[in-house]
Structures are given as structure tokens and as C-alpha cells.
């Protein structure tokens, strides 16, 4: 039987009807049409967040050297696959399953009857979409947090570390903090506000990245014997810009999608979240540009990109709680934090090639704390989480709760990551050999090049081009941008 084609205009015209149908009998509960609309929106948002893996691939590969570009890009496929399977089997239950104040203890492998879903996963019962849609949306968040980890450990980490740490992170690190804040755990009981994950997603990734960067030590040649920092330049700034724009696009699923509904609590609320998200990102890109101009003497291109991402990280916690003007303030200050933070981390001799600690860590802390300042009474009441911030008559209570949440989350993730990575370090090792690092991880870990025409004479390239075996091309090394730092005399 031939399937009847529905005209595009007819399909578009039906969408408002779905939304209206969801609000027509709100008192009687959501209608099938409303649930359908909410499900469609949540799945679309999940796909947007999944596409952020492409953004990370471009961003991280661009900010690092050509000899490891393929390795850095392909690990995003690997870690997304690991997170998908482990979070399905274990992580989702630990994060959202009904349990105790520390972790969930039910719902393993999503093996739950339809009638029991809201009991087993009571923390997600605010939305009536199917369990499969909830899992799909939440697993991509776990994968994003895991992607952040490796930016701070780029260009010197063994491939096996991605596999082992990815399993532990997806099963027992990320979901534990997620349970504390989103799954009905102790921070949720206190009323901590983190709408889409400045702490749950971004601070966790940055905390693990910091632990890894400290244990690994800096890349060869990053610091001189007297402590001076050498800029190890990224090989492709257009990749960085493209990656940033892809991440910006993905954030329209990341933050607005966290409503998990298009029809309630009020029609269009997800679009409000999208608006505050966009305002913050724009403010962050510009504030970072001007701060870099002042501190470095030039509108550094990688700093502009990092500023936009830092603003998106910061507004992730606050996007549903604050007024539009406050979202601009949150974003603008995050852009400044990104610039200063990248320089500070480098000054501390911590080699973070993509600025993960500053952009996702420092900005994540700021964004989470900002709720304690700017959360409005009406939005806190609408969402049913916490109370108003200091500037809206709430006193210091909400700010103190936010500080407690940030501190506990950082401590748990940093210590756990340090422990897991240290065990790996004394067993299988976490860092490639000096020879392999000089060769680049494309050839040493995968026996192939991301850019064969540059490194392999048989493909028409110039091979080592007079450099030590596998060292980067001097043509590539001559660029002047690095991960948020311009090379100066």
C-alpha cells in the first residue's frame, strides 16, 4: 500500500494544534497530543545535544596539533558509544532511580514496566513522555560531560584510558552527582538550582579534566626549566570557530530541552530558556573579545570562541531562573572568567590544551552560584526548585545552598577521578611514551595519520620535513593562536 504523503504546510499547521491540545484540559492531565508534542521536542533536543560531539571534535582538534587531530576527533565516537551503553545499563538507574540521598538503587537497564516508571524514576515524573525519550535525552548529557574531560588531557593520553575511565565515569561518577542534584538526592532536598547542568555536566567534566592534567603533567616543551610557558599552537582556528558554532547550536537542545516538554509548565517556556541562553552566549563572546584585547593586545580568536562557550556553560544553570538582563550579566562575566581563567591555569603550570578547566569549570561554578544572586521568585516557584536569589529578596540562603552544591560536587568528582586515574597510572599507564608523543597520537595509537598528505611522503607529503620522527610541521607550528593564549615575546 502506498503511503500517503502529508504536505509540509499541513504538518506545520498541525504543530500549534498539538500544543493547544496539551493545554485545553490541563486540570485533567496531559492529553495524548500533548505527550506527543513533548516527546517530539525532547527527542529533537536530544539529537541537538548529541550533535555537540561534533562540535567538541572540531574544537579540540583545532586547538591541538595536526599530528594528533584524528585521534582527538575519533575519541568522541568512542566515548559517546561507551556512555550510551554504560548509562543505559547502570548510570541512568544510579542517577534517576529511586534510592537514597546518595545514589539511585532501582531501574537497572531500564527494565521497568510502564505502570511503574513514575515510581522507579520519580525524579523524572514531572514529564509524561516515554521512558525511552527520557533516557535518550539524559544519556547525551552524560556523554557531553565525558567529552569535556579529555580536552584537558589532550595530546598525551593513552587510548586505553578513554575506555576504562569512560566506563567508571558513566557508571559511578557522573550519575552520583546527577542524583544528588537532579535525582532526588541530598542537594535536591536542599533546593539546589542547576537547571541544565552547569555543575552536573560541566563542572564534573572540568573537575575530572583537572585531575587528569595534574597526573599527566604538561606536554613536552610546554614549559621551560625556568617555568616560562611556551605556546603550543592549535593547527586549525577555523575548526575552532566551526566547533564553537556547532556547540552553540547544540545548546538550544541542551538548555531548552531540559524542560522535557513543549506544553507545560506553560506553553513557550522552553523558548524563554532558548532566549536567555542566546543572550548570554552573545555577551560572553564579546566580553571575552574585549578582555583579550586588553590583556593580550589583540582580539584573540580562540579567546572569543572560549568566551562564547564559557557563557553557555554559565547560563546552563540559570537560564530558566533569571530575567533576560541577568542572563546577559551572567554571560558577560563568564566570558571574562574564561580569559582570565585560561591564563591563570597556565600560570599554575597546568597544561590544559583546550581551556577545559577555565571554560567548563570556573564558568560552571560562576553560573551555578549566579542563581543564588539572580533567581527570581516567580520562576523558582514555577519550577518548584529552591527560592529567590540575594538580589530578589531571598537573602543568602539560596547562595549558600549553591556554594554547598558546587563544593561537594567538585570534591567528589576530583577525588574519584584522581583515584581512578592514579590506579590506571600505576597499572597500565596513562601517558604515552616520549617518542609516541613526538610522533603524534594519530600514528602512535592508530597507525595512521589524520593528515597523511602532510606527514607521509607516500601520500605526496614531505614526511618529517626535517623534524624529528613524527614531529609537527613547522608550517603548522608557525601559527600564533593556542588554547586561549596568544604568543607574545
Image (cartoon, grey):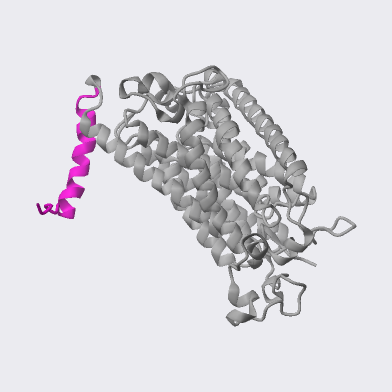
Farthest residue to the right: give it.
Answer: 226
Image quadrant in which the C terminus is located = bottom right
In this view, the residue in front, 11 or 456, is 456
For residue 154, which quarter of the picture? bottom right
Region in magenta: 1-26
Indicate the position of residue 307 as horizontal and vertical percent values. Answer: 59, 52
Q: Left or right? Give the position of 191 relative to 299.
A: left
Vertical order, 289 against 166 (above or below): below
At x 63% / y 76%, what residue is drawn? Answer: 456
- Residue 319 at x, y = what percent? 47, 37
Q: How many marks?
A: 0
Q: Which is more toward the observer, 478 or 334?
A: 478
Using the image, determine if residue 414 lies above or below residue 290: above
Residue reaching furthest to the left:
1
Q: Is residue 327 visible to us here?
A: no
Q: Is residue 111 left or right of residue 307?
A: left
Q: Is residue 4 magenta?
A: yes
Residue 441 placed where, x, y %?
66, 61
Whole-percent x and y of residue 155? 68, 57
Residue shown at the point (35%, 42%) measured from the top left:
43
Was residue 458 drawn as part of the magenta stretch in this picture?
no
Magenta region, main secondary structure: helix
Depth check, front residue: 390 or 476: 476
Residue drawn 35% across the image and 20% down it: 116
Residue 228 seen in the current view: yes
Amino acid at each position: 500500500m502506498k503511503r500517503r504523503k502529508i504536505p509540509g504546510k499541513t504538518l506545520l499547521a498541525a504543530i500549534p494544534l498539538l500544543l493547544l491540545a496539551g493545554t485545553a484540559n490541563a486540570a485533567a492531565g496531559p492529553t495524548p497530543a500533548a505527550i506527543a508534542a513533548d516527546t517530539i521536542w525532547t527527542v529533537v533536543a536530544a539529537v541537538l545535544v548529541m550533535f555537540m560531539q561534533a562540535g567538541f571534535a572540531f574544537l579540540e582538534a583545532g586547538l591541538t596539533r595536526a599530528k594528533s587531530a584524528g585521534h582527538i576527533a575519533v575519541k568522541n565516537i568512542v566515548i559517546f558509544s561507551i556512555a550510551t551503553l554504560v548509562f543505559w545499563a547502570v548510570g541512568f538507574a544510579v542517577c534517576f532511580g529511586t534510592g537514597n540521598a546518595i545514589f539511585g538503587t532501582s531501574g537497572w537497564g531500564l527494565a521497568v514496566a510502564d505502570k511503574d516508571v513514575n515510581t522507579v524514576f520519580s525524579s523524572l515524573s514531572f514529564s509524561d513522555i516515554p521512558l525511552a525519550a527520557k533516557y535518550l535525552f539524559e544519556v547525551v548529557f552524560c556523554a557531553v560531560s565525558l567529552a569535556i574531560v579529555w580536552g584537558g588531557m589532550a595530546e598525551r593520553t593513552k587510548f586505553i584510558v578513554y575506555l576504562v575511565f569512560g566506563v567508571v565515569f558513566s557508571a559511578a561518577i557522573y550519575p552520583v552527582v546527577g542524583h544528588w542534584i537532579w535525582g532526588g538526592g541530598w542537594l535536591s532536598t536542599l533546593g539546589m538550582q542547576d537547571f541544565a547542568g552547569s555543575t552536573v555536566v560541566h563542572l564534573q567534566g572540568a573537575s575530572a579534566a583537572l585531575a587528569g592534567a595534574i597526573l599527566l603533567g604538561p606536554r613536552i616543551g610546554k614549559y621551560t626549566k625556568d617555568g616560562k610557558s611556551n605556546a603550543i599552537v592549535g593547527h586549525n582556528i577555523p575548526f575552532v570557530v566551526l566547533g564553537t558554532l556547532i556547540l552553540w547550536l547544540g545548546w538550544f537542545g541542551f538548555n531548552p530541552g531540559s524542560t522535557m516538554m513543549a506544553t507545560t509548565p506553560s506553553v513557550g517556556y522552553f523558548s524563554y530558556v532558548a532566549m536567555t541562553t542566546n543572550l548570554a552566549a552573545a555577551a560572553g563572546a564579546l566580553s571575552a573579545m574585549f578582555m583579550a584585547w586588553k590583556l593580550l593586545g589583540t582580539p584573540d580568536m580562540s579567546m572569543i570562541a572560549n568566551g562564547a562557550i564559557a557563557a553557555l556553560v554559565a547560563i546552563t544553570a540559570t537560564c530558566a531562573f533569571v530575567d533576560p538582563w541577568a542572563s546577559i550579566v551572567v554571560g558577560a562575566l563568564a566570558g571574562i572568567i574564561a580569559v582570565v581563567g585560561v591564563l591563570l591555569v597556565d600560570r599554575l603550570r597546568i597544561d590544559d590544551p583546550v581551556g577545559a578547566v577555565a571554560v567548563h569549570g570556573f564558568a560552571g561554578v560562576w553560573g551555578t552560584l549566579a542563581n543564588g544572586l539572580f533567581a527570581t521568585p516567580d520562576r523558582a516557584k514555577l519550577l518548584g526548585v529552591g527560592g529567590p536569589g540575594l538580589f530578589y529578596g531571598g537573602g543568602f540562603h539560596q547562595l549558600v545552598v549553591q556554594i554547598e552544591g558546587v563544593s561537594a560536587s567538585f570534591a567528589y568528582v576530583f577525588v574519584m577521578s584522581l583515584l581512578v586515574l592514579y590506579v590506571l597510572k600505576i597499572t597500565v599507564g596513562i601517558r604515552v611514551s616520549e617518542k609516541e608523543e613526538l610522533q603524534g597520537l594519530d600514528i602512535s595509537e592508530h597507525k595512521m595519520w589524520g593528515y597523511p598528505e602532510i606527514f607521509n611522503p607516500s601520500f605526496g607529503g614531505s614526511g618529517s620535513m626535517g623534524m624529528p620522527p613524527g614531529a609537527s610541521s613547522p608550517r603548522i607550528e608557525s601559527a600564533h593562536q593556542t588554547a586561549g593564549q596568544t604568543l607574545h615575546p
